[in-house]
Image: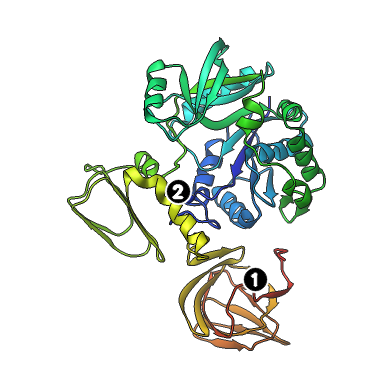
Amino acid sequence: MKIYPVILSGGAGTRLWPLSRAVMPKQLLPLVSDKTMLQETALRVAGWPGLMAPVVVCGNEHRFMVAEQMREAGVLPLGILLEPVGRNTAPAVAAAANYLLTIDPEAVMLVLPADHVITDRAAFATAVQHAAGLVGQGSLATFGIVPTGAETGYGYIRRGEAVGAGFSVDRFVEKPDRATAESFLADGSYYWNSGMFLFRASTYLDELAAFKPDIAGAAEAAVRLGYRDLDFCRLDEASFSACPSDSIDYAVMERTSHAVVVPADIGWSDVGSWSALWEVQTQDTDGNALRGDIYLDGVSNSLIRAESRIVAAIGVKDIIIVETNDAVLVVHKDSVQQVKQVVDHLKQKARTEHLHHTRVYRPWGHYEGIDVGERFQVKRITVKPGEKLSLQMHHHRAEHWIVVSGTARVTCGEKVELLSENESTYIPIGTTHRLENPGKLPLHLIEVQSGSYLGEDDIVRFEDIYQRA
């Protein structure tokens, strides 16, 4: 049996704002270790006997970051499927299933969200082996986390009769209130719903076609009409956009007669809030989980994270403090589910702090805002060795470039020149230009923009090695 991990790397992780944002969601961040959650997920299933290279499903806007993080982790994916829009897990997994069937008609899928924590890898491997035995008999397996408390933030699965190393699924239960969760824990027949699955690609698609033929048809067309774009597989936009949005649970697992649940005591967390992240992180003797430049005095049972400056906390407990260079969150651990309301507020006010950080990543490197004012903007730009920006032009702004370190090859109109440290150049409004790093070290420069409009949409691209529009 060949098992193909399918890593779902969609979602925005709004409850982990201000660190998680739309263009840099939690699965692409190093929240628990020095590796991102996507990298941890990929490495968790790397090198297992019988496990093949993974397929990653992600949004189009995250494609270059996903590819770069997989490269950094030393994992070569079997494919990276690009969703033109988010449509929940049932269509995403259906697209991956159709993709895998073009490679292996007997493919078995291990469906894994990219943003979960699993601390006991050996127990997880054992649970997958148990599930594989049931999948070989035609079952669709989900992994039920052995509960350690009366959690109200998770859905539950009630087990039925024993089936091999697992149980039939009696029913799925939505997130309960406190009293109901406590009764589930006392009952002993309920598990947390992990959102992880193991099944044959063909079996899943057969069940999906029986219960949700519109999703099955749209996902099949999205793969069949999709196309290669560099190292990515772009799902057909019209087909996938027309697909109804639904989860695997609602579309298939709650309807099929072939669902089984395999108990898994694996040190699992979906890291769905700041308090959940506090629980899975290493804590000091006072129960504090700390990261960054922090001063404490009389602080206990708190998570404090400083990204860009010193954070001082005195005489507080059970609190979350998260600092970035453009936002600060202070919230009691009992109120962390309300963080999403801040994101909703930012959207209503047409602000940008929920969309991206001041550092914005691009396939060639990144840029970071330093200062902005009336008719000017200053950025710090880093270009990776051998990379280049698009050949482009701006209608409303001129640009001054000053090289801080490294070597820059600058195209400005018909002129091409090499610039070294402390040298500068000027790009007039309306002039076609390009910036490249021909060296073996990162190129760092300061860009000063001036003009009547400084938005990122004032870019006309004539040529781009990354095939961006």
Helix, strand or loop at label 1? It is loop
Occupied quadrant, residue 141: top right
Circle 1 residues within 10 Å: few <14, some 14–19, many ≥20: many
Disc 1 designates what residue? Answer: 388
User: Amino acid type of disc 2?
Assistant: Arg
Helix, strand or loop at label 2? It is helix
Rendered view: 377 above or below 21: below
Rendered view: 87 above or below 68: above
Total marks shown come to: 2
Q: Is residue 110 shown left or right of residue 241?
A: left
**Residue 49 in sight:** no
Image x and y of residue 298, in percent: 17, 50
- The numbered disc on residue 15 is 2
Circle 2 residues within 10 Å: few <14, some 14–19, many ≥20: many
In the image, 412 versus 294, the foreground residue is 294
Quadrant, the C terminus: bottom right
Q: Earlier in the sequence, mark 2 or mark 1?
A: 2
Marks 2 & 1, CB-CB < 8 Å contact: no
Picture residue at 21% right of the left edge, 51% below the top: 316
